[in-house]
Image (cartoon, grey):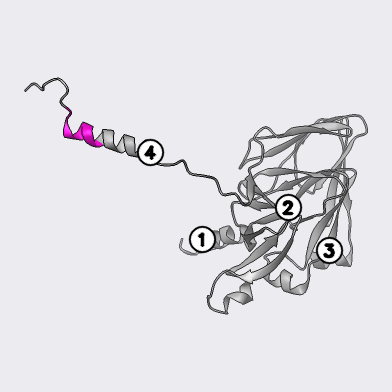
Amino acid sequence: MSYQQGYEHPLQQQQLKQHQYQQQMPAAQPYAGVHQHPPAQGDRGAFTGGNYNIAHRDTNAVLNLNLEQGATVRSKSGAMIHMSGTVQLSGKVKFSMKKLFTGGEMSESTYIGPGRVALGPTLFGDIITLHVDGRQSWNIGKDAFLACTSEVSKKSESQGLSKAMFSGEDLFVFRVEGQGIMWLTSFGAVDRLDLQSGEQHIVDNGHLVAWSCNYKIEKAGSGAMSGIKTGEGLVCRFTGPGSVYVQTRNVDEFQSFIQASAGTT
């Protein structure tokens, strides 16, 4: 069977109309509110006495450090994967009754160059580079710390009883002090949310990593009041200016999943 020149099959006509319709549709415009920034894939940089790069992002991240003679970096205990034989490693126990009750790190590892050091987080996730300039105030969750340069420190700070009960964090969080670099860890990938002055954004309480703006706790919806006891169904409402780092996975939810799966075997 032959067709006359110019004849269009009904299927071709339908495809042509669909193509013309798509061309006429206006392009989707991005939301003009909160700015969301995923971390750079090739995160690398320098600090006093060395340089760094983050490899195997974003769920199996490793922090690689190159230290010059005498340069010092501190990390959470147990974070070291490998290091040069020229690097001096020492552990320091910082015992205090406050740390005992706040859940803070009881020990840290100190690395003194020259040489290379590779550090990794406990869970599958990413590593965030937090540039601390002494002007912008940052708070981090109790499990977020991985490492820092010698000029940076973290100090436990009370966030109030009501926030401690309902935010997914403990009574104490860490305030970052000094000037330099701190590397944080996450469970899953990380997004950075930048809020303008007065702008509000809601974050689930189990996804917080670090924040530099004020927040308050509220219920996510009109559920049963029994959820308040465990913090379930509660969110953090942040108000700018400032930034919030959020992780894409929830440690508590993952733990519950593992426990439930183990119970069925």
Tag 1: residue type? Ala
Farthest-out residue, bottom: 225
Q: What amino acid is at disc 4?
A: Gln
| Total residue callouts | 4
Residue at point 84% right, 61% down?
A: 156
> Label 2: how many residues lie within 10 Å, few (<14), some (14-19) or many (20+)?
many
Dot 2 lies on which element? loop
Report, in whole angstroms, how far the alpha carbon at label 4 lies from the one at label 1. 53 Å
**Camera-side residue: 257 or 88?**
257
Mark 1 lies on residue = 262
- Relative image position of residue 100 (x, y in whole percent): 83, 65
Residue 16 visible in image: yes
Relative side of 56 to 110, left or right:
left
Say which mark, if any, is on residue 157: 3
Q: Would you name the residue on which mark 4 appears?
A: 24
Where is residue 45 shown, x and y percent of the image?
78, 32
| Image position, residue 108 (x, y; %) | 84, 50
Q: Do the residues labelled 3 and 2 touch (CB within 8 Å)?
A: no
**Which of label 1 and label 3 is nearer to you?**
3
Q: Which amino acid does label 2 sit on?
A: Ala
Marks 4 and 1, the one that precedes in the sequence: 4
Label 4 to label 3, Cα distance in Å? 56 Å
Look at discs 4 and 1 and give the one toward the viewer. 4
Label 3 to label 2: alpha-carbon separation: 15 Å
Is 156 placed above or below 25 here? below
Q: What stretch is highlighted in magenta?
A: 8-14
